[in-house]
């Protein structure tokens, strides 16, 4: 387990103690439920437990992103007349693909307040663990005229991180029926992740004037984010 995740577990425990200490402990009329929500391009599944004064809500979240780019270009180079090929035309194609995924396992603890028969507000916070993985690939193929030589460049990188998030939150639920609600939740979220990036690149060519090159390695990777997050949530209660 990374130091970031250990630190997150400790902070999450303090966060939970602070929230619990400020809540009443009634457990009468406990109901269980299942919910689904969307936020920031990802999806979450909620498991709400409503008591007389609290909402305890485990959550599983998944976010996926993919970006692609491709194109072509032509470059004409004029060299001094004494050069063996005074003019060269480089014709190339390139492709780039980047994907990322984030997984979360979290817990929410909230104090709830029934404003009317149909409207309930809640406040408290969420915390949990988060893993992140991204991969980027690129390839460039260039053909030189009039010689016909081909140059190929390939790059690849994989970034893996894990850590924690903390998110003080405020939400509202509207109950058109006693066992079903539409909700909106706003949170100020802080996350801290750490890990490493493995990367490699190579360049090959049949042009004797250029050498073949390759490179690989690993470097540390750390990410710290904070900002507001808004989620729309549907919940059903049994």
Image: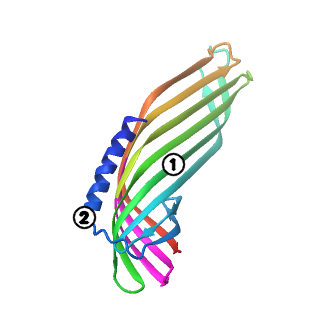
Choose between 142 and 215: the one closer to the eye.
215
The spot of residue 184 in percent (x, y) is 43, 71
Can you say whether 196 is above or below 68 in the image?
Answer: above
Horizontal relation, residue 140 to residue 216: left or right: right
User: Disc 1 or disc 2, which is closer to the eye?
Assistant: 2
Dot 2: few (<14), some (14–19), or many (≥20) neighbours within 10 Å? Answer: few
Q: Say which residue label 2 marks.
A: 22
Could you tell me if residue 80 is visible in this image?
A: no
Q: Residue at x 34, y 50 (%)?
A: 12
How does the figure colour the protein chain or chains? rainbow
Q: Say which residue label 1 marks.
A: 102
The spot of residue 68 in percent (x, y) is 61, 46
Q: Quadrant of the N terminus?
A: top left
Which of marks 2 and 1 precedes in the sequence? 2
Can you say whether 194 is above or below 127 in the image?
Answer: above
Can you say whether 75 is above or below 146 in the image?
Answer: below
Tell me which segment is drawn in magenta.
Answer: 168-191
Can you say whether 186 is above or below 226 in the image?
Answer: below
Could you tell me if residue 209 is visible in this image?
A: yes
Q: Residue at x 45, y 73 (%)?
A: 183
Choose between 148 and 154: the one closer to the eye.
154
The spot of residue 72 in percent (x, y) is 66, 40
Q: What kind of element bears circle 1?
A: strand
Horizontal relation, residue 106 to residue 85: left or right: left
Separation of residues labelled 1 and 2 (CA atoms): 32 Å
Name the quadrant containing residue 137: top right
Choose between 234 and 94: the one closer to the eye.
234
Choose between 22 and 79: the one closer to the eye.
22
The spot of residue 224 in percent (x, y) is 36, 44
Q: What kind of element bears circle 2?
A: loop
Q: Residue at x 33, y 72 (%)?
A: 26
């Amino acid at each position: 387990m990374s130091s970031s995740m250990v630190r997150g577990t400790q902070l999450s425990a303090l966060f939970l103690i602070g929230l619990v200490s400020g809540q009443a402990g009634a457990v009468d009329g406990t109901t269980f439920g299942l919910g689904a929500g969307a936020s920031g391009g990802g999806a979450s599944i909620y498991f709400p437990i409503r008591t007389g004064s609290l909402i305890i809500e485990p959550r599983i979240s998944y976010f996926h992103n993919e970006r692609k780019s491709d194109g072509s270009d032509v470059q004409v180079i004029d060299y001094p007349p004494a050069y063996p090929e005074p003019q060269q035309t480089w014709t190339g194609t390139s492709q780039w693909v980047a994907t990322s995924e984030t997984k979360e396992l979290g817990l929410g603890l909230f104090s709830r307040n029934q404003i009317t028969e149909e409207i309930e507000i809640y406040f408290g916070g969420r915390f949990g663990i988060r893993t992140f993985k991204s991969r980027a690939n690129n390839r460039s193929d260039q053909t030189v005229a009039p010689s016909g030589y081909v140059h190929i460049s390939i790059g690849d990188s994989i970034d893996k991180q894990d850590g924690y998030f903390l998110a003080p939150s405020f939400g509202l639920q509207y109950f058109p029926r006693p066992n079903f609600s539409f909700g909106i939740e706003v949170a100020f979220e802080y996350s801290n992740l750490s890990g490493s990036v493995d990367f490699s690149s190579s360049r090959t060519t049949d042009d004797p004037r250029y050498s073949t090159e390759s490179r690989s390695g690993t470097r540390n990777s750390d990410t710290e984010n904070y900002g507001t997050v808004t989620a729309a949530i549907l919940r059903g209660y049994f």
